[in-house]
Image (spheres, rainbow, N blue to C red):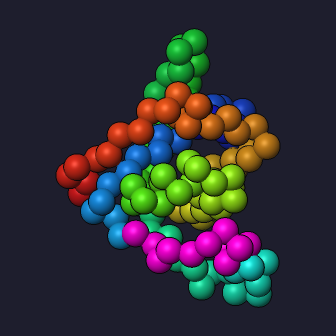
Amino acid sequence: KRIGDEANNEKVFINVCMSSQINAPREITEEELIEIVKSEDPGRYRVPISLGEPMADLDKHGQACTIFTVIIHPDFYRRAHSSPTFMNFLLTLMYEGLESKYPQFKLDTEASIPMSFKKNTHKEIKNAE
């Protein structure tokens, strides 16, 4: 997933991984999710997520970039992959979580390209720590 860093226009990649060691959120329907998001207390629906530290790297063109790894439960990953509503919710969780944890990164959510979902590269991390 590629997004731009507004502070210096550096590319940021978010690797979305899954692990059953991350707790699964409770099951809800798309309608329930929409209702929760529109409510005055959207935080009442919790999705456990692990946000990795930023790693400096180079993209395929040799340009500086930052890579984050985000880990979620496989069931929620599959749900997001099959539902635009849950996908948008997951993307929002990732962007807001990373910006909250790393305020030096201001992410341009309009520039996002969910590359890993397009490539269909689904891998589960067996021993996440």
Is residue 66 in view from this perspective? Answer: no
Residue at left offset 62%, top offset 72%: 29
Nearest to the observer: residue 114 or residue 108 = 114
- At x 46% / y 73%, what residue is drawn? 25
Give whichever of 15, 58 is nearer the camera.
Answer: 15
Query: Percent from the top left, x then y, of residue 27?
Result: 50, 74
Which residue is at the far top?
61
Indicate the quadrant where residue 94 lies: bottom right
Residue 84 vertical placement versus 57 (above, below):
below
Residue 114 figure quarter? top right
Which quadrant: the C terminus? bottom left
Q: Residue at x 53, y 28 (%)?
A: 119
Left or right of 59, for residue 42? right
Asked if the stretch drawn in magenta spans residue 32, the answer is: yes
- Relative to 107, residue 43 above or below: below
Task: State whether residue 49 appears in this view.
Answer: yes
Above or below: residue 24 compared with residue 79: below
Q: How many labels does the image show?
A: 0
The residue lying toward the viewer, choosing from 12 and 113, is 113
* Residue 13 placement, left or right of 74: right
- The picture places residue 46, in percent across and down from the top left corner, at 52, 77
Residue at image coords 79%, 78%? 38
The picture places residue 45, in percent across and down from the top left corner, at 57, 79
Dividing the picture into quadrants, the one containing residue 40 is bottom right
Nearer the observer, 48 or 96: 48
For the magenta stretch, what is the residue range?
24-34
